[in-house]
Image: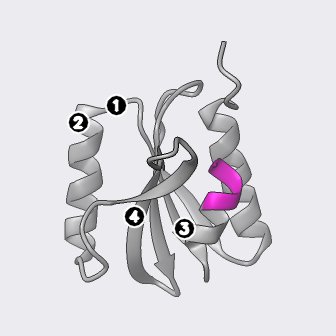
Amino acid sequence: MSDRLPTNLLVSALLRRVNDAGGMAMVLAKGDAQAGSILVILNDKGRFIGMVEPGRDLEGHAVLVPAGPGDTASPGEVTAYWQRRRTRDPDMWVVDLDIPFAQRFAAETIL
């Protein structure tokens, strides 16, 4: 048995926190409710700033790991990246956040 909360609960908490803080958050793709991975698309005022996903550092601590194309990617490149990832991992959730300090919201909620 894992001490990790179900993925659907983590995603729901993230959506609620961002929306309550005046930002926008939406699920672009639903994955496995219990153990799916989470890919978070980070935006600030509609400008793409990156993608992150939960991972581990060298000491085994939970961290957000950069993923996908860099912060200069076009919307088409971002969409193509997460759709390719979903073909390899259909259990993965894709969540789009648009709020200042989006990475902080993700880290505080899903780590």
Judging by the rendered image, the residue that carries numbered circle 4 is: 51
| Amino acid under disc 3 | Leu
Judging by the rendered image, the residue that carries numbered circle 3 is: 97
Judging by the rendered image, the residue that carries numbered circle 2 is: 87
Q: Earlier in the sequence, mark 4 or mark 1?
A: 4
Name the image quarter holding residue 87: top left
Q: Within 10 angstroms of label 1, few (less than 14), some, or many (20 or more) residues?
A: some
The label nearer to you, 2 versus 4, is 4
Marks 4/1: CA distance?
A: 18 Å
In percent of the image, x 51 and y 45: which residue is there? Answer: 59
Residue 58 to residue 40: above or below = above
Query: Element at badge 4?
Result: strand
Marks 1/2: CA distance?
A: 6 Å
Q: Within 10 angstroms of label 4, few (less than 14), some, or many (20 or more) residues?
A: many
Marks 2/4: CA distance?
A: 18 Å
Q: Residue 106 location, x and y as percent?
A: 61, 60
| Amino acid under disc 4 | Met
Q: Quadrant of the N terminus?
A: top right
Q: Which segment did they paint magenta?
A: 107-111
Judging by the rendered image, the residue that carries numbered circle 1 is: 90
In percent of the image, x 26 and y 44: which residue is there? Answer: 85
| Amino acid under disc 2 | Thr
Marks 3/4: CA distance?
A: 10 Å
Whether 109 is among the magenta residues is: yes
Q: Residue furthest top?
A: 1
Its colouring scheme is one colour
